[in-house]
Amino acid sequence: MNIHEYQAKALLKGYGAPVAEGVAILKADEAEAAAKSLPGPLYVVKSQIHAGGRGKGKFKELGPDAKGGVRLAFSIEEAKAHAKEMLGNTLVTAQTGEAGKQVNRLYIEDGADIARELYCSLLVDRSVGRVAFVVSTEGGMDIEAVAHDTPEKIHTIAIDPEAGVTAADIAAISKALELDGAAAEDAKSLFPLLYKAFNEKDMALLEINPLIVMKNGHLRVLDAKMSFDGNALFRHDDVKALRDETEEDAKEIEASKWDLAYVALDGNIGCMVNGAGLAMATMDIIKLYGKEPANFCDVGGGAGKEKVAAAFKIITADPKVEGILVNIFGGIMRCDVIAEGVVAAVQEVGLKVPLVVRLEGTNVELGKKILNESGLAITAADDLDDAAKKIVAAIEA
């Protein structure tokens, strides 16, 4: 689960991190009061969407010469004008894709005198099985280019979970960021609290880009991005309350209600599979035969008829889907249950695209019997290769 920048900053501020004052707004006529509540005279008006690259983004409705999704304002009137222009329009960034995201809220923040822009993030480094700091002196909007062109400028410092962030770790991070003076002193408190927040809130990612050194020598969190482990949200009602469903795919929201592992993709073949590994293999073989999967959908090992039917409805609700491939290996999951769920869903929502079903495992013959006697236009497949060929052929017919 992701949250907005202003929410992430509020969370970090609660741990003691240095952040600027700011106000989130939903309406353009709230911009004046928000700006007046800040010290000024420089304000930053920031689009709040769940995507990076906002500063370099472009608004679909405003033309190529319009400013991006993060703008400086040197007066309250200019902040008001930016808010009026940005709210309700669609911001396209490198991370949103061509469709972009509608800007439904803004964050108006007090400006900062920036001396240097740094990069700092925390994530789980699976190569060592530890949380690690990833830092660079080259912070700001071009960090992706830095990672691609000059990876030697990015440093990773893994943290021993038993020791926590030690003085040696702080020294290593500070050296990598070339911190001295007041910034080096700030680092002694900032990096341990970032690590504490990451662990206590079960984050999957904490990214601060940029982490700035101000002209007075001190550090400040200028931007913050957070992603949380969905499997741990039951422990964090305060984090769940920050969820903005308008930033999420409606199909993924519906899938979460049924405890389905579902991720929307850009292809045209819908997939319903049990087991993450089998789902990945199914997606791979669809690509092998020249098509693209429209989703990752794992119904799990013990799904019932209702859950299968719900998954099928979610897949068919995607207008990009031109065909559906159901691939089930029945271990704990019984093939007859899958068949009953598919038949029930098709009978309820109809079948407007080709459907290929491959069943194998527990009660497979009963499952095939249910499908064959349903009277529905369902194509059976003998194995995964056969299923992929049939669904691709059906779409191209």
Image (spheres, rainbow, N blue to C red):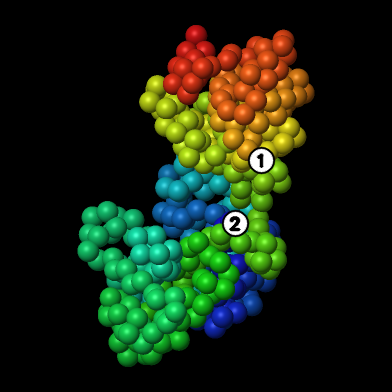
- As drawn, the label of residue 7 is none
Which amino acid lies under the numbered mark 2 shown in the image of this protein? Gly
Q: Give the Cα distance between marks 1 and 2.
A: 20 Å
Residue for point 73% across, 32% down: 305
x, y percent for residue 192:
45, 81
For disc 1, the neighbor class at 10 Å (few under 14, some 14 to 19, many from 20) is: few
Return the residue at label 1.
Answer: 302
Residue for point 49% across, 80% down: 193
Tell how many labels.
2
Residue situated in front as seen by the camera: 107 or 128: 128
Figure quadrant of residue 320? top right
First-in-chain label (1 vs 2):
2
x, y percent for residue 170:
36, 83
Residue 124 seen by the camera: yes
Image quadrant in which the N terminus is located: bottom right
Element class at badge 1 = loop
x, y percent for residue 183:
37, 85
Which amino acid lies under the numbered mark 1 shown in the image of this protein? Gly
For disc 2, the neighbor class at 10 Å (few under 14, some 14 to 19, many from 20) is: few
Residue for point 63% across, 38% down: 332
Looking at the rendered image, the disc whose residue lies closer to the viewer, 1 or 2, is 1
Above or below 267: residue 383? above
Above or below 175: residue 379? above
Return the residue at label 2.
Answer: 230
Element class at badge 2 = helix
